[in-house]
Amino acid sequence: MSSAPVATRSHASSRSASLPVAPWLLMAPFLFGVILFTLVPLLSSVHLSTRQTFGPEFSTNVGTGNFQFLASDPLFWTALRNTVIFTLGSVLIQLPLSLLLALALNRPNLRGRTFFRVSLFSPVLVGVVFVGMIFAVIFDKRTGLINRALHATIGWDIDFPWLESYIMPSLVIATTWQYVGFNMVYFLAALQNVSAELGEAAMLDGANAWNRFRHVILPAIMPVGTFVVLLSIIGSFQLFELPYILLNGTGGPQNRGLTLVMYLYQTGFQTGDLGYASAIGWVMALILGACAIGQRIISKRGERA
Amino acid sequence: MANQRPEQTGQPPRISVFWLVAAFALASTIGVIALRTERSSAARMWTFARLHYSMYEPAVEEWNKTGEPKVELSLLGIQAVEQRMLSSFLTRKSGAELMEIERRIASRAFAGPLDGVGFLDLTDRIKAEGLDQKINASSFTPWSTRGRIFGLPHDVHPVMLGYRADMVEAAGIDVSKIETWEDFITVLSPLLYDADGNRRTDRYLLNMWETHMDTIEVLLLQAGGGAVDPDGMPMLDNDANARVMAHIAAWSHGKNRIAADAPYFSASGNRLLLDGFVVASFVPDWMCNVWRNEIPQLGGKVKLMPLPSWERGGRRTSVWGGSMLGISRDAENHDQLWEFAKHLYLSPELSRELYTKGDIISPVKEFWSDPMYDKPDAYFSGQAPGRMYINLAGDVPPRYSSPFSVLAVERLRTVASRLATYAKAQGDATPESLLPEAKRLLIEAQDEVMEHARRNRFITPAEGEGS
């Protein structure tokens, strides 16, 4: 017994000699990548946001000028408004729909359950560029599938300008088609962890379906729900490829399809002002940071409750 | 016990894992170095159009027999050319020594200070060799900024109207009576047609819409308007722009609607042309080739006519599209590359190829007398499109590039769209009733672009306003 602590000390001393080297060496490639490709660009983008640039060669200090100009730039506010509208559309339409589908497909006695799950999930496997091209054809005036079908059935205006006057609703429809099944999988996983006994007990106590959902299922899936909401907000703020394809790289009529990332791209990579683009990026990061903090607060409250 | 982690057994981590990772890292580094291809000493040239590529191949081959440096021609997607060009200019690393680019891309290359333009300034060479006299003057303007020329022009691209001659002639209409846009509407209005009696027009006179920025620009330039002035400064709020914008909105949504949307370059648009949904479309010389290849069924049913003018005796054409060949400023052997550029672009062989394969007329004026341009074309019902375009080439309006072109054109697009919304709300709008709103929107747009222009610290007012 008395020799054990000695042996431990001996191992500890040999570990203290070898530990600092090997783990750090093993982590070195990863750390090198993180520092070089994440931390350094992140810090340099703070500096960049205080400069006006034309590529890396021409640069001049503007202090907070980029942020001041941003505050009065109508294009920035248009892009922000469009992005928020799209985000609200995604969160308020896509997520409830995903939850409804998950609830429907979680019923054990449903026939063809696997088929429906695969069918609803499969659009995620399609590349965004293809989705853009498909929906450009679907939303076409006069010859597009939607206008044609609705015109034939309910006499809908065959020239209905989806991609001119209703760009954001069109984008919400396209992304809902693509991602509803993806979010459904999150909800399905959460639903499968809800205790069946609790549901049965509530039923025995006379709770109807709505009450069981409201008081048993919803609290149980709330952590996953808030996480999915956060992911959805982040994903919506990153919207770029779909409007880029649908609107030929422009913001569309009256910039109705201009999103924050599109404006950032146009400013940084087409006009060459990386400083102003960095300022846009930082404002976007602050908004998303606030959303993440909001999600943490809601989650904590949920845990306490 | 065998699966226990080192911490649990009290054993230090095995250093052999580290050596394994290191060995992989070393092997992959060697692999990457070994895979590196040797950079050819030939000058690289990028083009974005398959047709251009096929036309240039023989000329490049011929040059490579004796000329120096050897040239390696590559075909890239237009967006790839744009991204690579911008990356190479912004980082000052030469992507390709020679780049053929399209007009919209070019204006992006001119976004910064003159020192930041990645193309070689060709002004002095062009003037010293008299090329400014030899080549159609307006062909230089898209490749010029602040008084300097950065590219050798590839084309002229005059615009005419392509119309359904079968429908027009069946209705006994004589298009030679059309001189102005007003005449166009009066003469062709019998063709506005409601096929099924549902009080909804099924045939319109003009393929034009508030979202077609290309065709809006065609009309603005024809009327003497546009996005930027010869000095490169935004000039959105001029009378010509207001007048054209008011007409476009009234034509698309007004009391006497004549325009409809048959999108250019799309299968659905081609279908609508075939169905006779619109009578006339804007057709620059290169579009003849697009129609010939994509809508062969229209062969013998269509004809061309000069654009109706905005006032009697006015300009009967405009311009749409264009390409240039530029030399990278960071390339070596500027003189030799310049010789190659002239060999490629100014040869009579290329001018013939341009027309026979692409329906494009050469910008070199001395080639315009070539009899090939007089050959009747069965697709256009026996007309000689080449000669018709050449007759209009001297009247092609200039269009200027500047650091503010992209933003100014974008704002014009917004004005067109907002005015269309206003016209729809009015219900019975006419060009006259829309004119005050058009002027107001253009002034607002001009102010917005000027805000950005004033913010730009790299382009001093003297540089932007002068030269």
Image: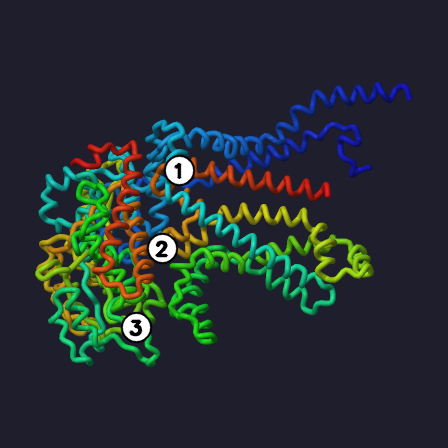
Q: Amino acid at mark 2?
A: Pro
Image position, residue B84 (x, y; %): 36, 44
* Marks 2 and 3 in Cβ contact (< 8 Å): no
Residue annotated with mark 3 = B277
**Label 1 SS:** helix
In the depicted structure, whether residue A253 falls above or below residue B326 = below
Residue annotated with mark 1 = A70
Query: Based on the displayed image, in which of its 4 quarters is residue B303 positioned?
Result: bottom left
Q: Chain of mark 2?
A: A
Image position, residue A272 (x, y; %): 35, 38
Residue annotated with mark 2 = A253
User: Local crowd at mark 2 within 10 Å, few (<14), some, or many (≥20)?
Assistant: many
The residue shown at (56%, 57%) is A93
Left or right for A153, reference A205: left
Image position, residue A74 (x, y; %): 37, 43
Q: CA distance from mark 1 to mark 2?
A: 22 Å
Foreground residue among B350 and B425: B425
The residue shown at (68%, 29%) is B15
Foreground residue among B447 and B231: B447
In the depicted structure, whether residue B287 falls above or below residue B146 = below
The residue shown at (10%, 54%) is B365
